[in-house]
Amino acid sequence: MKELIRYIAQSLVDHPEQVEVTEIEGEQTSVIELKVAKEDLGKVIGKQGRTARAMRTILSAASTKIRKRAVLEIIE
């Protein structure tokens, strides 16, 4: 999951070396935190949050396959 989000985020931003992804795992749910450079934040969120929503949808589909819930948090 973590690698999937890192790959998508690095493809979107201008400064891929500043993309940080951390995963906090629980029993049923894992929280994936995405941190990018301040000037790239708009690219990751997208117009009206569409890009962020699409990333969450992909993450949800991938996490369903392994029967674990995953939540994406974008940190400023």
Image (cartoon, rainbow, N blue to C red):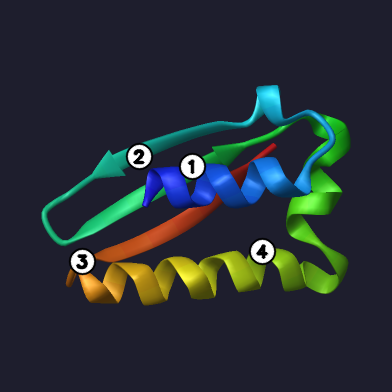
Q: Which residue is mark 3?
A: 68
| Mark 2–mark 1 distance (CA, rounded to whole Å) | 6 Å
Contact between labelled residues 3 and 2, with CB atoms less than 8 Å apart: no
Whichever of labels 3 and 4 marks the residue nearer the N terminus, that label is 4
Horizontally, is 34 left or right of 13 in the view? left
Q: Residue 19 at x, y = what percent? A: 63, 31
Whichever of labels 2 and 4 marks the residue nearer the N terminus, that label is 2
Q: Which residue is mark 4?
A: 52
* Numbered disc 2: secondary structure: strand
Residue 23 is labelled as: 2
Viewer-nearest residue: 59 or 26: 59
Q: Say few, some or many: other residues with alpha carbon within 10 Å of mark 1 (under 14 / 14 to 19 / 20 or more).
A: some
Q: Residue furthest left?
A: 27
Whichever of labels 1 and 3 marks the residue nearer the N terminus, that label is 1
Residue at 21% x, 66% y: name it.
68
Contact between labelled residues 4 and 2, with CB atoms less than 8 Å apart: no
Q: Say few, some or many: other residues with alpha carbon within 10 Å of mark 3 (under 14 / 14 to 19 / 20 or more).
A: some
Q: Say few, some or many: other residues with alpha carbon within 10 Å of mark 4 (under 14 / 14 to 19 / 20 or more).
A: many
| Mark 1–mark 3 distance (CA, rounded to whole Å) | 16 Å
Residue at 56% x, 41% y: name it.
34
Q: Amino acid at mark 3?
A: Lys
* Numbered disc 3: secondary structure: loop
Whichever of labels 2 and 3 marks the residue nearer the N terminus, that label is 2
Q: Amino acid at mark 1?
A: Glu
| Mark 3–mark 4 distance (CA, rounded to whole Å) | 20 Å
Whichever of labels 4 and 1 marks the residue nearer the N terminus, that label is 1
Horizontally, is 8 left or right of 45 in the view? left
Whichever of labels 2 and 1 marks the residue nearer the N terminus, that label is 2
Count of number-bearing discs: 4
* Numbered disc 1: secondary structure: strand
Q: Which residue is mark 1?
A: 33
